[in-house]
Image: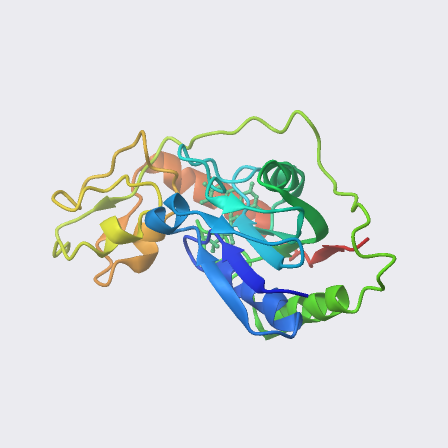
Amino acid sequence: MGNVTAIYFSPTGGTKQYVRAVARGLGKAYGEVDLTDKETRAQEHTFAPDDLVVIGVPVYYGRVPQLPDGLLRGLRGNHTPAVLVAVYGNREFDDALLELSGLCEKQGFYGAAAAAFVAQHTFSAKIAGGRPDADDLLIAEEFGRNIKALPAEKAGREIRLPGNRPYRSFQVAPFTPKGDKKCTACGACARACPAGAIAPETPRETDAKKCIRCLACVHVCPVHARRVGGPVYGMLVKKLEKELTKTEKEARLFLP
Ligand SMILES: Cc1cc2nc3c(=O)[nH]c(=O)nc-3n(C[C@H](O)[C@H](O)[C@H](O)COP(=O)(O)O)c2cc1C
């Protein structure tokens, strides 16, 4: 095995934790590419056939987050194996792994293994709150170890992923986070926004056309000045909490 790289888009940190745990399980020192960062996304990252990447995204509306600049556009695989990771907030991952697999193929990777893991829902700490916990991360690490231990005749075989084509239609929620009077204009939100939807000069505002509703800005604000308000969001959160707090889902692992 050549170099191992942990690649993730993770506005509120759940996906990052899982991708790192899988990479740890592969048992080698690994590099990182954080696609949450706009500049990192714009750079080229090239991988060799004997390298191995772990690529993780959160699930948005049963899909891969849609960024206008193309989430994986800077990644260049050369028939490089990829461990595909989708992290979701206890509803479902629907077509996300299948879509991630298609996007990775276009960039020169092939899916060597895949997993869907549960993390706290971006919109409510009551949904899968505190996950990934220590047990979740042990499972992800063990998954990495199992990939490493795959016998040569199995490694490289196609994996079968759930999901449908055409993929579910991607929705855009009718709310955006905004800053209130507590905002000190420190600029942390503008730097953290993966979509460039917050101008550093006017950090209380959000460009609704660019915003992907990931809440990275809410997560990073040191004085808790940013939040989503309004009745539509309140109703959505209540509905999600009612539907998604009865049982907690477990990891789904796909090996050849
Ligand atoms: C816009 C948006 C849409 C989401 N859609 C889904 C979904 O369809 N299914 C689900 O289970 N969780 C959904 N979630 C929850 C996230 O997938 C989950 O919280 C994930 O852990 C966030 O990853 P991160 O912590 O790396 O940012 C959604 C979150 C956001 C912000």
The reply to whether residue 131 is visible in this rendering is: no
Q: Position of residue 50 (x, y in %)?
A: 67, 58
Query: Which residue is depicted at the point 85% across and 64% down?
Result: 151
Camera-nearest residue between 184 and 28: 28
Camera-nearest residue between 147 and 61: 147
Query: Which residue is depicted at the point 43% across and 36% down?
Result: 67
What scheme was used to colour the molecule? rainbow
Q: Position of residue 186 (x, y in %)?
A: 15, 57
Camera-nearest residue between 137 and 89: 137
- Say whether residue 235 is left or right of residue 22: left
| Depicted 230 relative to depicted 17: above or below | above
Count the marks: how many? Answer: 0
Camera-nearest residue between 176 and 186: 186
The reply to whether residue 67 is visible in this rendering is: yes
Q: Position of residue 40 (x, y in %)?
A: 38, 51
Looking at this view, name the residue that lies furthest to the right: 153
Query: Which residue is depicted at the point 67% across and 46% down?
Result: 79
Q: Position of residue 59 (x, y in %)?
A: 55, 45
* Image quarter in which the N terminus is found: bottom right
- Say whether residue 210 is left or right of residue 112: left
- Say whether residue 240 is left or right of residue 189: right
| Depicted 124 relative to depicted 140: above or below | above
